[in-house]
Amino acid sequence: MRILFTSLASYGHLYPLLPLASAARDAGHDVVYATGPGFHPTLEKAGLEPVTAGLTLHEAFGLLFAGDTRSRYEVPEAELNEAIGKAFGRLLPTRFMTDLAPLLAEREPDLVVYEMGNPGGAFAAHQAGIPAIAHGFGRVSSGGPMDHISEQLGVFAAELGLDGDTRFFWGQPFVDICPPSVQAPEFAAGARRVPLRPVGWSEPGDLPPGVESRDRGRPLVYLTLGTTGASQAHLLTSALRGLASLDAEVLVATGPAVDVAALGEVPSNVRLEAWVPQSELLPHVDLVVHHGGSGTTLGAFAAGAPQLLMPQGADQFTNADAVVGAGAGAKLVGDELTTEAVRETAGRLLADRAVADVVRGLAEEVAGMPSPEEVAAQLPQYG
């Protein structure tokens, strides 16, 4: 079977698809992966054939704000949400459609698997008469910028002759890596879900020294604000100071958007790392403090770790609400996010037995979901 996978060129959008794409390849299918060239080395390391398609998020927003000298934080929320709707609901899908059309004609895949943030894959498949299924990257959110995206996509899809609710991806099967108990109820009830266990994916690499051999009597707290511009030095510093005052080891993944020098000197119980293999690290962690990105949220569910979320944008707020609603952690938003609040909340979560029971149950729920190999075996029925 010939299968084309496609996603936006972003860690949070591409990494969730790699386990299924790799399992499909291992099952003997002819797999090609279409995304931006910046992630082609990652795909090659995973043993997948990359091809170029689409714009990056930076390119898309560069086009929308061409000539605008304001920083992202100077743009009013309403204007920013409208731009997000245009980027994800029209600009990015259009470019992916354009780039995928000749590729689909040349490769003639039997099935297109498109990441939910890249509906251009669905639109291109529809125009080529090829079956398509969606692949999620986390909880399906609504509200805020998501409503603007859905509105734009609904108009675009109607122009192409695709009927159905955009929230449920035009009635197509949807590979859902979110545990059912924390998935959006409306989506879980209405979509044609194909459950898939969220398997973390990291670039191959070693864990920081001492993580595997450390004394488990002292908790390990992992702090990350992800790989996007949401990573701000002042926010990281505030959280870091609060965590450093705990009787715990603190491992901070600073990511590419933070100047480590700007963090200054850190206490002896804090370790700064530009990058860590997160999927390998999480099973060793006692608390995850993060921005609310889908990959980290699901990874913590799978690892059975409590979470303290500090959401900054996009779907991070609804992810935080889901974690809090499940009893699996806490959130700090806006003015609540102080050094003292981080210290107090993190200390409470580390000692809370009720939270420990909840996250243990979530880990068991994730472990019981179908594996990538099991879902790869189902793919021929959708082609």
Image (tube, helix red, strand yellow):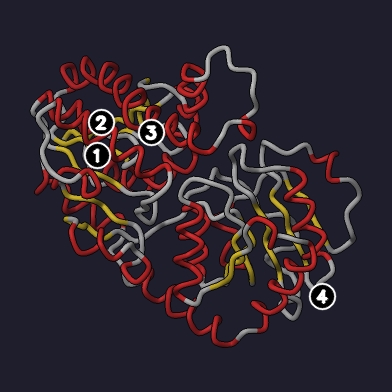
Say whether disc 1 or disc 2 marks the residue closer to the N-terminus.
1
The C terminus is located in which quarter?
top left
Quarter location, residue 263 = top right
Dot 1, how many residues are within 10 Å of its Cα: few (below 14), some (14-19), or many (20+)?
many
Identify the residue shown where x is 35% and y is 28%: 49
- Is 115 placed above or below 358 here? above
Question: Are circles 4 and 2 on residues that touch, CB within 8 Å?
Answer: no
Label 2 crowd bin: few (<14), some (14–19), many (20+), radius 10 Å: many
- Identity of the residue drawn at 31% across and 61% down: 371
Q: Secondary structure at mark 1?
A: strand
Please report whichever mark, 1 or 4, sits nearer to the chain's N-terminal start: 1
Q: Residue 113 got which mark?
A: 1
Name the residue tied to disc 4: 247
Task: Give 227 or 148, whichever is nearer the viewer.
Answer: 148
Mark count: 4
Relative to 379, does residue 132 appear above or below in the rendering?
above
Circle 2 residue = 121
Measured Cα–Cα span from mark 4 to mark 2: 49 Å
Identify which residue is drawn at 67% across, 61% down.
222
Residue 315: x %, y % from top left = 46, 50
The answer to which of marks 2 and 3 sits earlier in the sequence is: 3
Q: Is residue 134 left or right of residue 159?
A: right
Left or right of 44 on screen, residue 136: left
**Do the residues under discs 2 and 3 have CB atoms within 8 angstroms?**
no
